[in-house]
Amino acid sequence: MSSSHHAKQLRSRRTEQRLVEATLSLLQEGGLGACTVPAVAERAGVAVGSVYRRYPDKQAMVGSAILAVFSVPPEAEGQYVAIVEESSGLDDFLRRLAMSSIVAALHNRTLVLATRDFARLSTDDAWLGEYQPLPGRARTLILHAANERFRAEVPGGE
């Protein structure tokens, strides 16, 4: 692979990342209505044509960004398990879990609502098939780690 080809791939990945970040920030700021292709292009610092070279339409662009934010790559799983490992006990774990959930919901309310609306309105079965298991992935990681650590402290064991 030539160095110019590698540089082109790197630029493409960076552009893709900027588009995802721009999409998510617009969803966070103003919901689905604020997230238009021209607005994303402007926020990402690219031409509208660059967006359309990657995505056929707004739905594909928004859907891709949502999948990116809700995916839990294997290298990030430790972040979710840390809430269990860093807790001094079951009460502390439950307090940390509740607070992190509340803070996340408050700080990301518009994004969460936009994501919910997008998923509810989506007619793309392939996208829905990818998305539907994702929101529960982090919860599953946390609950599995909590069950392993605190099983003896919970009546019934789970």
Image (tube, grey):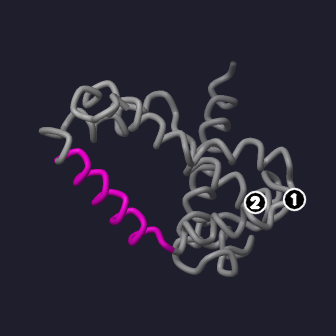
Left/right placement of residue 86 relative to residue 151 reads left
- Disc 1 marks a residue whose amino acid type is Thr
Quarter residue 37 falls in: bottom right
- Disc 2 marks a residue whose amino acid type is Val
**Residue wearing tag 2:** 51
Camera-nearest residue between 117 and 2: 117
Residue 9, how many percent across, how many down?
66, 35
Check the picture and name the quadrant holding the N terminus: top right
Residue 100, how many percent across, how many down?
31, 57
Q: Secondary structure at mark 1?
A: loop
Camera-nearest residue between 151 and 99: 151
Main structural element of the magenta stretch: helix, strand or loop?
Answer: helix
Q: Please provide the residue range marked out in magenta.
A: 92-109
Dot placed on the residue nearer the N-terminal end, 1 or 2: 2
Left/right placement of residue 108 relative to residue 67 reads left
Residue 123, disc? 1
Q: Secondary structure at mark 2?
A: helix
Q: Is residue 21 above or below residue 135?
A: below
Q: Is residue 19 above or below residue 109?
A: above
Q: CA distance from mark 1 to mark 2?
A: 21 Å
Q: As drawn, which residue projects farthest toward the front? A: 156
Residue 59, disc? none
Q: As drawn, which residue projects farthest toward the top? A: 1
Q: Is residue 94 magenta?
A: yes
Residue 113, how many percent across, how many down?
59, 71
